[in-house]
Amino acid sequence: MRILHTMLRVGDLDRSIKFYTEVLGMRLLRRNDYPDGKFTLAFIGYQEESEGAVIELTHNWGVESYELGSGYGHIALEVEDAYAACAEIKARGGIVTREAGPMKHGTTVIAFVQDPDGYKVELIQRKA
């Protein structure tokens, strides 16, 4: 078994695709409309689906926003340099909600950014 994808419901699919591709540097792997079900699925990631886990963005037509709830945590991405990644994300128009720095009670360097729907994405700096 392996993890295939994580699904996020989004209010504006084009806005979300733009964030994940232009701000976080992922690629749009595929996008399909399902008119009978009134929804669109878009799969994004850094690699092909056959090579690793990706994110499924689900847009239910006519729904502009969702309550995130208290159960959802975040998506985590490994980065070479969290400080540089934050600077690049801000330069691309992204929102950094926690600047890069050591995590509390540890030494791992992390940061958090927020996607257009409010989902948190953690950046974890690769250890030397």
Image: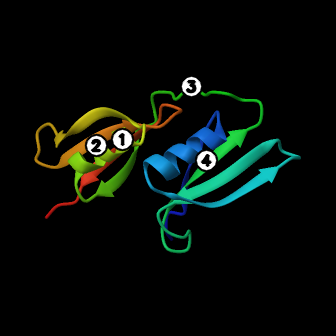
How many numbered marks does the figure carry? Answer: 4
Per the image, the residue denoted by label 4 is 57
Q: Which residue is mark 3?
A: 67
Which residue is denoted by mark 2 in the rendering? 87
Give the SS element for disc 1.
helix
Residue at 82%, 50% in the rendered image: 34
For the C terminus, the image quarter is bottom left
Q: CA distance from mark 3 to mark 2?
A: 29 Å
Relative image position of residue 116 (x, y in whole percent): 51, 34
Residue shown at 33%/46% (left/top)? Answer: 88
| Foreground tag (4 vs 2) | 2
User: Which label sits in the foreground, 3 or 2?
Assistant: 2
The kind of secondary structure element at disc 3 is loop
| Snapshot quadrant of residue 14 | top right
Q: Earlier in the sequence, mark 1 or mark 3?
A: 3
Q: Which residue is mark 1?
A: 91
For marks 4 and 2, give the CA distance.
Answer: 25 Å
Above or below 69: residue 47: below
